[in-house]
Image (cartoon, rainbow, N blue to C red):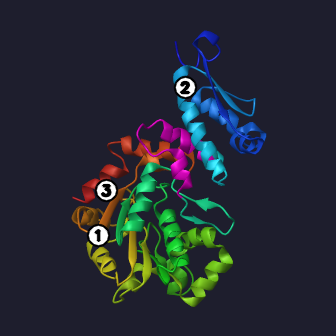
Amino acid sequence: MSAKSTLGEAEDNSQTHLSATAEELAALLGPYDSHRKLLEDLLEVRVTSRGGGVTLSGPPQNTQAAAELIDGLLQTIRSGRGLATSDIRYAVRQLKHKGQVPIADLLRTQTVVTHRGKPISPRTPGQAAYVAAVVSHDLTVCIGPAGTGKTYLAMAVAVAALRDSQVSRIVLTRPIVEAGESLGFLPGDMLEKVDPYLRPLQDALHDILGAEKFRKLLDRGTIEVIPLAYMRGRTLNDAFIVLDEAQNTTIGQMKMALTRLGFGSKMVVVGDITQTDLPAMQTSGLAHAVRVLSGLSGVAVCELTGEDIVRHDLVQRIVAAYEADPAGVRSEHEKSAT
């Protein structure tokens, strides 16, 4: 008999009650009970608010697991952090992977607060390990598929480091690699031509800092957003450097970028080796760096997976579908890197 079919059979059901105030219940159950409905659907339990708390009814194994998860969500609410629908989905995802970081611990690991008051924190154990590596190492290399928060979390840690005066500036860079269209067909001078390629980096900081503060820091030179080619010959001291889309670097470009690291600086290199835009048969500098830097003292190499995707649920399924196709993009890039 399936877990869902036993939900309404009293003899197979158990009940668990968790205490909560009216305010905590309102935050937990969400507007118009949207969180309640989601929890019931994903956990296959019945969630009712009664007697100064929430009661869970269903098969014993379901109610026990749901109680652990909801207790973590209540701890998060009590710490002053609000809940979003995405938090519920991530919490359930983590619950299904035994031995991983409790959701309450993840959501309490706040990196920085955006200008709108939204806390930015790791949402998966993989992301938590990545953020911890960035904080504790001078050089962190992170690979992973789209949507795993590689760049965004690096930006958040960079802003926190700048806020806490750990560094005096943030330098954001990425290689300018054409993907089907020539730069010559874009209007304007060289800086205007490369602006669309650097725009994703600026968008992330707009979201975290707000457009006005970002523009002020940019004008002062506290934040630089530049093409990788402009990094040659520089030594960056007291800076937090983020190299984005690093899969599109050559081995020579990667070595050049890594050797820009100066005193008091920290660097994060991120990319997705399955989405390389380099010419066929040219080895990605990121894939090479992962190979040669792994195990080097002072360097952290992190790999995020489909389990760490925090975009639309469909993105996780899209990535899994491509990875499952032996003739797909991933296998092509693996061949080109050999």
Q: Which residue is mark 2?
A: 62
> In the image, is 82 to the left or to the right of 222?
right
Mark 3 nearby-residue class (10 Å; few <14, some 14–19, many ≥20): many
| Rendered image quadrant of residue 174 | bottom left
Give the Cα separation between the discs numbered 3 and 1.
29 Å
- Secondary structure beneath dot 1 equals loop
- The label on residue 333 is 3
Label 1 or label 2, whichever comes before in sequence order: 2
Label 2 or label 3, whichever comes before in sequence order: 2
Q: Main secondary structure of the magenta part?
A: helix
| Rendered image quadrant of residue 10 | top right
Q: Residue 157 in the image: state x and y as whole percent.
A: 49, 68
- Secondary structure beneath dot 3 equals helix
Q: Which residue is mark 1?
A: 298
Give the Cα separation between the discs numbered 1 and 2.
43 Å
Q: Residue 71 in the image: state x and y as whole percent.
A: 59, 39
Label 3 or label 1, whichever comes before in sequence order: 1
